[in-house]
Image (cartoon, rainbow, N blue to C red):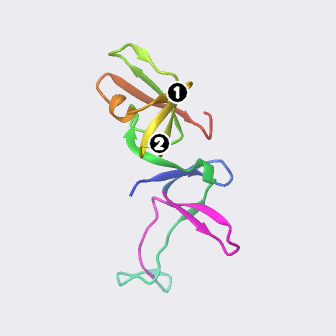
Amino acid sequence: MRQYRGLTKDGKDFVYGWYVEAEDYYKKKRHFIVLSNSQFYPFVDGEEKVIEPREYSVNIVEVIPETVGQYTGLKDKKGTEIYSGDLLHIWSTFYEKDMPVSEVFWNEKYAKFDIKVPGGLYNSWLTNTHRKGWFVEIIGNIHERR
């Protein structure tokens, strides 16, 4: 299962895990991240037991829905996971070329991650920017503008 991230409701921190959209009692949509460090273990009478589970302890955090981004399965040159909504600096030593700051997004039409650059779209960035001689570095994201 792919991991997601989203900014907490207070807008201070990103949390990482699995994305859940649910309606509350008043039929209002709410958005949550089930934290990836959640422990799924059984509790009986408040104590952890090694038996069939009756309850599970899950840590969930409500997030701002517009900030939810999915992990692409790729990492930048420092080993940091790349998510949709990240801003990338991409350059090639082979072609001696710097691309403009690029935004990662999910391309619904082709069901793949792509990048947007000012004035256009670069397709197939997954295959091109992770080849020998190309480097990718996360320099921020569209939600924090670091």
Q: From the viewer's side, name the closer residue of 63 and 110.
A: 110
Q: Is residue 12 magenta?
A: no
Drawn side of residue 51 relative to residue 6, left or right: left
Cα distance in 3D space between marks 1 and 2: 13 Å
Q: Amino acid at mark 2?
A: Asn
Please say if 141 is above or below 132: below
Q: Position of residue 92 (x, y in %)?
A: 37, 19
Name which residue lies at 44% across and 47% down: 71
Circle on res. 82: none
The residue at the point 32 percent across, 16 percent down is: 94
Q: Which residue is mark 1?
A: 120
In primary-sequence order, the first of circles 1 and 2 is: 2
Viewer-nearest residue: 90 or 61 = 90
Image quarter where the C terminus lies is top right
Q: Amino acid at mark 1?
A: Gly
Secondary structure of residue under mark 1? strand
Say which residue appears at 38% left-offset and 26% top-offset: 135
